[in-house]
Amino acid sequence: MPRKVCVVVTARPSYSRIKSALTAISGHPDLELQLVVGGSALLHNYGNVSQDMKDDGFDIAARVYMVVEGENLITTAKTTGVALVELATLLDTLKPDVVVTVADRYETLATAIAASYMNIPVAHVQGGEVTGSIDEKVRHAVTKLSNLHFVSTDRAAERVIRMGEDPDTVFVTGCPSIDLATAVLKRPQLDFDPFTQYGGVGATFPLSDGYLVVLQHPVTTEYEKAWEQVSETLWAVHESGLPAFWFWPNVDAGSDGTSKGIRVFRETEPSSRIHFYRNMRSEDFLRLIFNTRCVVGNSSVGIRECAFLGVPVVNIGSRQAGRERGSNVIDVGHDRTSIQTAIHRQSEHGRYPPSHLYGDGTAGQRIAELLACRELTFEKRLTY
């Protein structure tokens, strides 16, 4: 009988972080994929990533609606509780052999708690990393709830082992998002029109003279400053002289402030050459950033995929503090002058040497093979 692997995807970035593993799991003769989609991955305001999954050929076993509207600390906690209740019911129905949970979002914690209390083994992707915010606490908590650890770097593996996990359960697979970047490098040209293919709102502009890509999410431990922080970035980008593609923030505490800041700026500065998107298919998004002059903001894509692709990055604020990074990143605070100076420096620098810090493009296949492993030491970790 194939081993039933339940993978829970709850947000736009989580899909790109696990997509290659989903492909490898679904194609493995000894595995049966149970894809569960929930959270903001089902919501139009955040790109409705579930449609991308369907377009990519994945069958969705179940959908879980769990997001409590408000985008503040209270609704984050309540969403985690709703997710825990709904996922417990769902896991009882699906009866998987192992549950895979991704990264460090609050829905990830709910997934790990539900599976652990139901004596279902948990495999955690991207544990052992440091970022310094509530995400880090969640990530480490999920590590302690997990039976298997598929980490991205050697340092992350060392950290998980120092937390007391059995070294035989910790595997350096690399990050599955690098698998997508590897595939994009085979055809990196921007062979589509972002304006006509994805719509969005805001100015249109020629791409021949270069452009920026901006992704700025609220920092949950600084959520009350979200409007102020995004405003500094908006003005820096506007005054840089380069047009920009700007992507909507994740559904986190403070995202309402980030969104309002964007909307106010868009209304008061109609001459700004910024085009806004909710979402874009993973491969197209990677082609967009491969051909950009610079990526700006605080998304982990600047730390992971951009390091591999050699794309210059201006990383703003504390959201990625402590995370391993390549030479392609300049760190600045939430100050428009500093941001603008860094944008000019990076946009003039050109491409950096590629870094394999977060993997070599084979993570998804490695994860699938490990999940299918029938060796005794693995079986001991899959039983209680």
Image: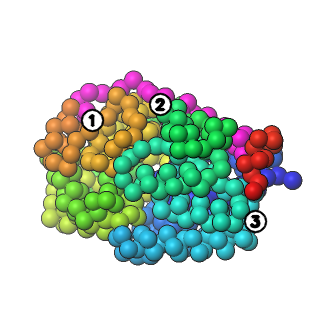
* Depth order, front residue of 230/125: 125
Q: CA distance from mark 1 to mark 2?
A: 17 Å
Q: Name the residue carrying label 1.
A: 330
Identify the residue shown where x is 57% and y is 70%: 84
| Amino acid type of the residue tagged 2 in the rendering | Leu
Mark 3 and 1 residues: CB-CB less than 8 Å, in contact?
no
Q: Is residue 278 visible?
A: no
20 shown above or below 344: below
Give me the disc on residue 163: none
Q: Quadrant of residue 121?
A: bottom right
Q: Which residues are magenta?
A: 346-371
Q: Quadrant of residue 112?
A: bottom right
Q: In terms of sequence position, does the residue under pointer 3 or pointer 1 come before the other?
A: 3
Q: Name the residue carrying label 3.
A: 95
Where does residue 246 sit, x and y in percent of width and height?
31, 53
Q: Quadrant of the C terminus?
A: bottom right
